[in-house]
Structures are given as C-alpha cells and as structure tokens.
Amino acid sequence: GILFGIYKPLVGVLFVYAAGGTLISAKLGQPLVGLNFNQERREADFRYGLVRVRENAESIAFYGGEAAERSGLVGRLRAALDNLGDLLVATRNVDFFTSCYRYLVTFLPAAVVAPLYFKGEIEFGVINQSSSAFSHILGDVSLVVYQIERLASFSAVTDRLGQMTEVLNGPASALVAPPGPAGDAKIARGAIVREAVRSAMDAASASVSGGLNGGKEANSNDANVINSAEKLRLTGLTVRTPGAYGATRPPLVDNLDLSLSDKSSVLIMGQ
C-alpha cells in the first residue's frame, strides 16, 4: 500500500524487476540441477570404489591388481572433480547475478521516484521510505532468486531418491531381459530347459574326465580318473596364479596328491 500511495508505477517496476530476475535466475540455475545430480552420482561411485578396495584389499594385493584398482579410483575421482569444476562455474554465475540483483535494489526505487522529488511533489524522506518498502516487498517475491542454489540441490536429491524408489518398487523382472537380445536391460536371460542343462552338465563332465585321462597319458602330474571306486585322483598337482606375475609368486597349491572316492568331499586351501 505504501508503494501504491507514493507512486503507482513503482509497484509495476517492482513486479517487472522481480519477474525478470526470477526468469534470469532460473535460466542461470537450470544447469545446477543436472550438475548437482551428477556430482551426487559421481561422488557415490567414488565412495563405492573406495569401499570395494577396502573390502577386497587382500585379494587385490594377492593377485597384483593394485594398478588396475588405482586406475579405476583415479578415473572416478577425476570425473567427480571435473563435474565439481563445472558446478563451481555455474554457481559463480548465479552468485554474480544474485549479488547484482541485490545491489540494484538500493538504487532502483530512488531512481524511479527521484523525478517526483525534483518536481517538488514529494519530500526527500519519501525516497527513503519508498526504498525501504521496495526492498521489503521485493525480498518476499524474490524467493527463487535468493534460494536458487538450494532449490537446485534439493531437486537433484529428490531426483536420485525418485530413481531409487522406482527401482525398489519396480518388479525384479524389469532388470532381466526376456530371451533374445539383451537390449537396455541389465541381465540377459535365456529359456531354461532341463534336458539342455542336463546334457550340458554331462558334456562338461565327459570333457573333464577326458581331459584328465588324456593328461594322464601325456603327463603323470595331471589329474586322472582311475576307476569307479576312485572317482578322482590327483597326482603332483600344482596351481599358480595366471599370467607372468603368477610365475614369480609361490604356487597356490604345490605337488598335491589326492584320491577322492564316491560321495566324499574335500576342501583344498592354497598357501
């Protein structure tokens, strides 16, 4: 009411200024939503990589996978830092505009009503009164301008939670592709036929048995199947980790002799 009583066009200037500031702020802050979302995702990927390395540190050290794991962690960290740089640039632009928006509020009301003062239609104190009322009302209608960064961050968090909720509430079959091309699904599934599985298992057993028997003829240190009473006999079995790295390391199993009969079990542990 004060602005309307002092100078009616000042009310229109207020709403035009607030609307223009809101539109520009929304335009500048639009990239913040995607950048905040990507930052949350990439930081989560990096944290997952750290936890994975910590939980599998013994296996990684045993198989010499330090270089591969370090490369993966560095790549994830670099992706997070690159996105953080883009996020800082976008935040800087928004902050610059917000600072200018706040700064102009100090001079805009005085510039609008100053002609009335020079004409002698209002007193000097009315200028200060109009500036105070203009700033107070503008603060109420400029919520988007002043809180654009928090709104963008809140939108990114809600998007991530929404995606997680959709995955948790969706059927498990949505993660599995039907028989045929996998497409965009996570897991490819084919039709399961009992006879096909049984024949595949029989073929695998025959292949293993044939390989073991053939190895006996070629080298007495290979695994062999002797007779029906002894289902499996291993003589002088040595197991090493694959690759050139394993050749320089102590063997996992060295010179193992084993005889396994029907319906029996055994646990073999490496060094």
Image: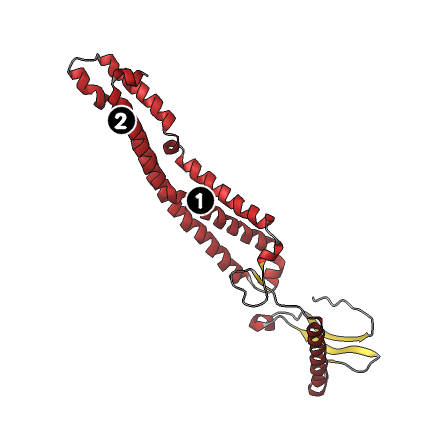
Residue drawn at point x = 61 percent, y = 67 percent: 190
Q: How many marks?
A: 2
Is 157 in front, or is 190?
Answer: 190
Residue drawn at point x = 38 percent, y = 42 percent: 30
Q: Position of residue 10 (x, y in %)?
A: 26, 22
Check disc 1 and report the residue beneath it: 36
Give left or right: position of 59 versus 70. right
Q: Earlier in the sequence, mark 1 or mark 2?
A: 2
Is 270 in front, or is 160?
Answer: 160
Check disc 2 and report the residue beneath it: 13
Is 104 in front, or is 220?
Answer: 104
Question: Disc 1 residue type?
Answer: Asn
Residue drawn at point x = 30 percent, y = 31 percent: 101
- The kind of secondary structure element at disc 2 is helix
Q: Position of residue 199 (x, y in %)?
A: 70, 76
Give left or right: position of 113 versus 234. left
- The kind of secondary structure element at disc 1 is helix
Q: Give the number of the mark in front: 1 or 2.
A: 2
Which of the 4 quarters of the picture holds residue 207?
Answer: bottom right
Q: Position of residue 75 (x, y in %)?
A: 46, 56
Which of the 4 quarters of the picture holds residue 94?
Answer: top left
Residue drawn at point x = 32 percent, y = 38 percent: 24
Q: Quadrant of the N terminus?
A: top left
Work out which residue is located at the far left of the displayed protein and give it: 119
Q: Are marks 1 and 2 in contact (CB under 8 Å)?
A: no
Mark 1: few/some/many CA within 10 Å (<14, 14-19, 20+): many
Question: Disc 2 residue type?
Answer: Val
Q: Position of residue 146 (x, y in %)?
A: 38, 31
The answer to whether residue 168 shows anywhere in this view is yes
